[in-house]
Amino acid sequence: MTMHRRAFIRGLSAAPLAAGSAGAAGSRVLQVATFPDLDRAAALAVPRFERAHPGVRVRLTVLAYADFPTAMITALAAGANLPDLMGMDREIVGQLADSAGLHDLSAVPFQAGQRSSEVVPFALTAGHSRKGTLTAFPVDIGPGCLFYRSDLLQQAGLQEAELTASWADFIRCGERLKARHNSYLVAHAGDIADVVIRNGLRPGDGVFYSAEGRPLVRAERFEQAFNWAARARRSGIDARVTAWSNEWAEGLRRGRIASQMFGGWFGGHLANWIAPKAAGLWRCAPLPAGNFASWGGSYYAIPRGAREPALAWDFLQVLALDPAQQRTAFTTLDAFPAMTAVHADPLFDQPLPYFGGQRARQLWRDASQRIPAVDADRNDRLARDVIQAALERVLEHGDRISDVLADAERRILRRARISASTAPA
Amino acid sequence: MKPNIALTHALVGAGALVMLTPFWFMFVFATHTNTEILSVPPPLWFGDALWDNLKLLLLRLPSFWHNLGWSLYVALATTALNLFFCALAGHAFALLDFRGRDVLFRALMLTLLLPAFLGMVPTMLVMGWLGWMNEHRALIVPGAVSAMGVFMMRQYIGAAIPREMVEAARLDGCSEFGIFWRLVLPLSWPAMGSLALVVFIGSWNNFISPLIVFRDVENFTLPLALRSLQGTGQTPFGALCAGAAIAVLPLLLLFIVASRRLIEGLTAGAVKQ
Amino acid sequence: MSARQHTPETPRRRWREAFRRVQPYLFVSPFFVLFAVFGLFPMLFSIGLSLHRWDPAAGLSQMQWVGLDNFRYALLDDDWFSQSMRNTLWIALVSGLPQHLVALPLAWWLHTRLRGLRNLVLGLYFLPFITSTVALSLVFTSMFSKDFGIVNTALGHVLGLAPIDWNQPEYTKIMISLVVFWRYVGWNTVLYLSALQTVPRDLLEAAALDGARPWQQFVHVVLPLLKPMAYFAVTLTLIGNLQLFEEPFILTGGTGGIDQGGRTAAMHMYRVAFTEGDFGTASAIAWLLFAVMALATWGNNRLLGERKGSR
């Protein structure tokens, strides 16, 4: 292709794009960085916000969930190309909340402390930095429950109460289910461990670290968690598939995996694509053994490099503290509201057809009030990697639990101590 | 000999089919719904959800055609600039004698050894200082020079351009740039073809650099735009595959055009020798 | 050949001479200006960074000098690093060797046996090289799925093997190597095929007249002539495989797999940088990897590179 033709094609593709970018001069732009599906909830709020703020245009940046932390961390590192409002998932909020590059929302001019009582307390805890400043504000949460196939349970002669009484009962039910249907009760033994380590925390502790940043993996709850997971594996009640894999989805679809512990938003997944044909067969129960946990949840933060911090705070308040927005995001996108006022709405008492008319939203609401407030630490992801590897050694190779946990603690100390000494002054 | 040849033909053919299989699935998935894709066994033949997937793609990614256009623009501009600069540098390293030539070349090759994303933060700093954030030249200009391109051109020019011709042209009073433009460039056509292919493909598929530079979805290049559909919610895999299938078509076209010319150009060169 | 002309004005001649001496530098200068900004600066930045401790999310002002501590940690304390290096070397070898051992005969076959269908077959082998990873992650996860993925189905029918759980650590590396092989064998075939075009026809005819069979022609006439291209192609393979990131990343969902079975050095670097928030160690790891790659390319140079004066 000659140079001439290349230039022509260049001009051709640039022309229609040039037309689109004109007309924005003079208006203020609010840049909001999100990922799917948080972007759809934000998009719901945009028209009303723009009408209430004439001359303001909201531009949503959408990046893949996997790319989003990389892009935001790089932006914070370089102090360049920062959005005005930065969304983030519970997964990374621990890492980012400590950043010196984010505004303290409880300070002037945001004064988020005045409104923080309007959201569920446990969600607020994770948004605090190690220094105690509030850097990330919650917009939605993922209160956890046990989703299970009630028909399979009934046919095996089991009751829901038996399933959730204790972990020992849970595993015993799993064995009965296996014998009767050749179905697995859980997708992976690690799911049980995940729940157990999140309960029995001392106040102020995080899951993996104490308030001072020391690893807690030798605590009682970790031993118990690993024990229950190992017992589940030995009883043969877990399918040994990872969540979101093809085998996992197919297992749930066919009833070969009879239960799953996840946040309330999982109901939407089940109904829409995993097992649409199993409508009416699934139910929700509280997590076994009186445990409570949450999966997921979204937050927003305002970087110090933002050009429009006041506008960003206005928009954040719409997303997090406007009942209409919270309600719509819930009904259309399964984004469980973090705002407690919305929990009194009658829609929570609606029977859900997929769950055979069960008023599952009440269950999730009750769970949300009892989930322990757990601090998120910058090194959470590191610890999770290490614990994951440690659990695999127990489950796959049968190593001794106390040895494995001691080794995990050493490993975390080695790795996290390096990062810990870069705590912002 | 015959059965051996037939067997080898069959092997080569089987190999080609294996190469094709993931593509096959990509195109097949583009015609199915999420439920069908994420199942065991996955679909082997086309379904009937193609139209729905395309509609969903354009609904969730309204700037799809813009993104395609941007990818085309960036890839073409990068390739054009890259060919020019790398040929120039390759000419210098292969045909010119100057102090520090070998040291410079070795320093150049060393840069090949650093992983790309280590440069993310410093590159972002530079882009911030230059004020090139959200602009496409932030992708084109760094891509205009590649160590691999210089390496390739130096190898080829060094091997394929007869020194006598260059000496004769110099003695005839031709300027060095004239030699480059009128002698070396036309004779380096095969290597430039290969390089153009590689640079174009690399630019087309790159999503790390756009990840740093862009915030407006309308300005994304195609891979980044398609990736932006993947999230915590229900990723529309069928729509994603449909978009990826469309994204691969220009590259296929380019390869079909380029390979024919390429092989012709190479064969012509061989006969001449 | 024109005789040297004596120009009366000496300054102009000196200017021309000076220009001629500077010309090579002018030729390479656009490259080096851009290289200085986009290649050298990041390199220097990462050297500096490897001597600091830095959590990137905290911002630029938070760097702390630690000297060689990051290197000490990576070499002595970080067993995920040493495992990732082992994984990388294993995958580099197992996926790299077949790439060339298959591409070379394939290119020869396409060159000598297939005239009409050549472009089509070449195109099919080249297809993997041009795909972006966006859709491939989904496709490969599906293909390597344990129960009905097509790979296990094919292996079952052809070799009678039981379904393999490719996520188990002992198989993860094999899965990654297969995908890397799939991706790059066509690229190497294109390279070798283009080099084969420069083999003079008459040399081969002379060898045939001397009674050499096709196989002997290939080994004794063609292979030596392909050495420069082999040097180039193997260098690229070495560098690419030792830096391998995309394929293991998409096949293990970014985690490196159970027991870090599929974690390559570049992936480990990425996770240390972004998940563990330790850019300093990540940079140190990059430089350690750099040293390994420099060694490998030096070795390749000795093996396949041009000898001075051998042209």
Image (cartoon, coloured by chain):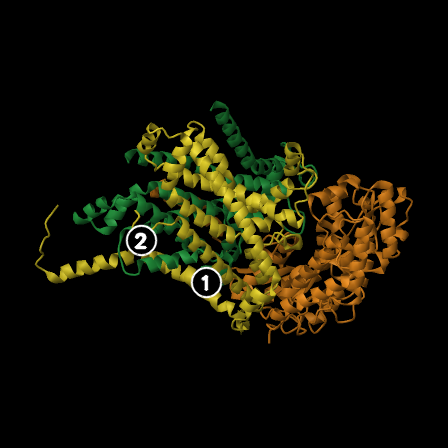
Residue matched to label 1: C42
Q: Chain of mark 1?
A: C
Q: Chain of mark 2?
A: B
Quarter occupied by the N terminus of chain A: top left
Question: At label 2, which amino acid type do we have?
Answer: Phe
**Which of the 4 image quarters holds residue C63?**
bottom right
Apparent colour of chain A: orange
Image vertical order of residue B241 relative to residue A265, above or below: above
What percent of the width, then of the height, locates residue A201? 78, 67
**Which chain is yellow in the rendering?**
C
Quarter occupied by the C terminus of chain A: bottom right
How crowded pointer 2 is (Cα within 10 Å; few <14, some 14-19, many 20+) is rated as: many
**Which chain is green in the rendering?**
B
User: For numbered disc 1, what is the local secondary structure?
Assistant: helix
Whether residue B29 sits left or right of residue B126 in the image: it is: right
Residue matched to label 2: B93
Q: Are marks 1 and 2 in contact (CB under 8 Å)?
A: no
Question: At label 1, which amino acid type do we have?
Answer: Pro
Image vertical order of residue C218 relative to residue C166, above or below: above
What percent of the width, then of the height, locates residue A106? 66, 72
